[in-house]
Image (spheres, rainbow, N blue to C red):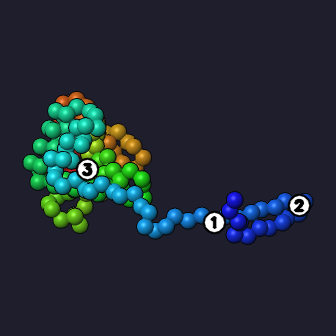
Amino acid sequence: MATPAFSYEGPASIRVDVYIHSVPAEVTTPARPAEATPEQMLARLQRNGGNAENQQAVWDALRSYGLTPGLTEPRTGTRTGRPQPWINWRNGQDRSNPVICEVNSRSVWFTRAADVPKVRGLDGARRHGTSIRFPIETPEEVALALAAVRACL
């Protein structure tokens, strides 16, 4: 049995033992590499569920608007090392440009304070905390989501 770092004998003979455990710094869970291509990112979204045709339609439209998908980085501080389950879309290649929208396998959403007022009153808008989401599970919903993206460009 381990020896406590220190012990304290309190009132009524209550004893408290404190043990300190640490993990060596060199023991880490290796993270998977970031996705290297936009095609890999789209394939991941399509594997995560939803309608692959609708996801492809959203993807193609966002690219045609000049938006660029942000290559996802693996999560830090988790044991899985998996990429985030969504993709950020920006104007151009510069990562310092603000995120216009985020897309997962079932919705497009907006979080920027400047964009939320532009989209919250649009058809199909659903409030989700401080963000506004648009489902993309039907072709009609895709059209509404893309109208919201255009409102923010």
* Residue under numbered circle 2: 13
The crowding category of the residue bearing disc 2, from other C-alpha atoms within 10 Å (few below 14, some 14 to 19, many at least 20), is few
Quadrant of the rendered image containing residue 12: bottom right
The reply to whether discs 3 and 1 touch (Cβ–Cβ < 8 Å) is no
Element type at mark 1 = loop
* Residue under numbered circle 3: 87
Q: Nearer the viewer, residue 144 or 6?
A: 6
Which residue is rendered at x = 22% and y = 31% of the image?
51
Tell me where residue 55 appears, x and y as whole percent. 20, 38
Callout 2 amino acid = Ser
Tell me where residue 137 appears, x and y as whole percent. 25, 31
Where is the N terminus found, in terms of image quarters?
bottom right
Q: Nearer the viewer, residue 52 or 91?
A: 52
Measured in 3D between alpha carbons, the distance from the residue under mark 3 to the one under mark 2, in whole angstroms, is 58 Å
Q: Which mark is residue 20?
A: 1
Q: Earlier in the sequence, mark 3 or mark 2?
A: 2
- Asked whether the viewer can see residue 147, the reply is no
Q: Earlier in the sequence, mark 3 or mark 1?
A: 1
Callout 3 amino acid = Ile
Callout 1 amino acid = Ile
The reply to whether discs 1 and 2 touch (Cβ–Cβ < 8 Å) is no
